Amino acid sequence: MRPLESVPNFSEGRDRSTIEAIGAALSRFARVLDVHSDEDHNRSVFTLVGDEDELTEALSAAVGVATARIDLRAHEGAHPRVGAADVVPIVPLTPEDMPRAERAAAAVARRLAGAWDVPVFLYAPPERGPAFYRRGGTAGLQARIDTGELQPDHGPARLHPTAGAVLVGARRPLIAFNVNLAHADVEAARAIARTVRERDGGFPGVRALGLDLPRVGLVQVSMNVEDWEAAALHDIVERIATEAAARGAEVVGSELVGLMPAGAAAAAAGAMLRIDGFDASRVLEVRLLGE
C-alpha cells in the first residue's frame, strides 16, 4: 500500500530548539523527508510520509509539542496563521488514494481535538481552504465562532488561549513556491500577487500573497500552486518578472517550500531547454520507479 503524505505547518521559524522538538516528535512515528523553516514567515513546514496510523501518531505528538511550546500571543511573522499547529494537510500521492486521505484527515482531526483540547476545523479546498478560516486572524476566527457563522468540527468552541486552532484537511498535491523581489515595497508585491492569482484573473489554481521580508530586505510573492499542470511554474515566474520590471523591481530568486512533484520539475526543465514533448515520463528515475 502506498504511503500518504502530510505537510504540517507550524507557527515557529526562529526557535531552533522548538523546531527540532517538533521534528523529533514526527520522526518517532513517520518518515520525515524535509523541513523548511523561514524566520520572516516565522513558520516551519515539515514533509512526512506514512500510513494512516503512523501519520495520526506522528501528527498528534508534534501538535502536542507545538501546543506546549508556541504561544500565539507573542507570535509575529509575515505569514497568516490561526494556530500554533496552523494547518495539517493529508495528501494522497495518487488520485485514487484521496478517499484514504479523507479518512485519515478525519481520524487526525478527532485525535488532535481529544488529545490537546484545541478546536479543529476540517477544511475543504478550494471553497473552504485555510485562507477562509484565517481571515481576521485568531480574533476574527473566534468572533465567527461566537456569532454562529462557524463551529469547529471537533473540540471546544473556544480557541486555545496560546495555541489557537488547527486546520486539518485532505487535499491534492500542491507546490508551495515563493518568488523574492528587490527594489520593491510590499504594496508592489501585493499588486504583482494579484496579477498571478486565480481569484483576480491570473493563473488557474494559484493562490498568492505579497509579503514583506524585513530580515532579508526583500519582498515576496508567496504562492500555493494547486494545479501545476494547469499553471506551469516557469510561466508564473516569467509573469512575475515582467510585472516586477514594469514597476522598477527585479526577481532575485525563488524558493520551494517542501517538495514538489517530479512532473512539475520536468515541465519547467523541458520548457527552459525547449525540448518538444518533454514530460516526467522522459526522466530516467521516474520511469524506473514506475516500473
Image: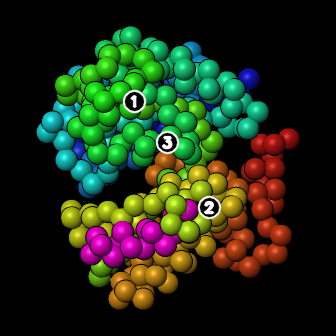
Indicate which disc residue 150 carries.
Answer: 1
Instruction: Name the secondary structure under disc 2.
Output: loop
Q: In the figure, 86 relative to 77: above or below?
A: above
Q: Residues within 10 Å of mark 2 (few under 14, many from 20)?
A: some
Q: Which residue is found at the position 29% from the left and 45% from the top?
A: 136
Q: Residues within 10 Å of mark 3 (few under 14, many from 20)?
A: some
Question: Between residues 239 and 64, which one lies in front from this camera angle?
Answer: 239
Part of the protein shown in magenta = 185-198
Q: Main secondary structure of the magenta part?
A: helix
Tell me: 158 left or right of 265: left
Residue tagged 2: 204
As measured in the structure, the alpha-carbon distance from the residue carrying label 3 to the one carrying label 2 is 15 Å
Q: Is residue 60 visible?
A: no
Q: Mark 3 or 1 closer to N-term?
A: 3
Q: Residues within 10 Å of mark 1 (few under 14, many from 20)?
A: some
Residue 241: percent from left, percent from top: 48, 80
Residue tagged 3: 129
Instruction: Name the secondary structure under disc 1.
Output: loop
Residue 233 highlighted magenta (yes or no): no
Question: Between residues 32 and 90, which one lies in front from this camera angle?
Answer: 90
User: Which quadrant of the rendered structure holds the C terminus?
Assistant: top right
- Mark 2 or 1: in front is 1
Residue 116: percent from left, percent from top: 32, 15
Q: Mark 3 or 2 closer to N-term?
A: 3
Q: In the figure, 273 relative to 5: above or below?
A: below
As measured in the structure, the alpha-carbon distance from the residue carrying label 3 to the one carrying label 1 is 14 Å
Residue 195 highlighted magenta (yes or no): yes
Q: Mark 2 or 1 closer to N-term?
A: 1
Amino acid tagged 3: Gly
- Mark 3 or 1: in front is 1
Residue 99: percent from left, percent from top: 69, 26
Q: Which residue lies most toward the top here?
A: 114
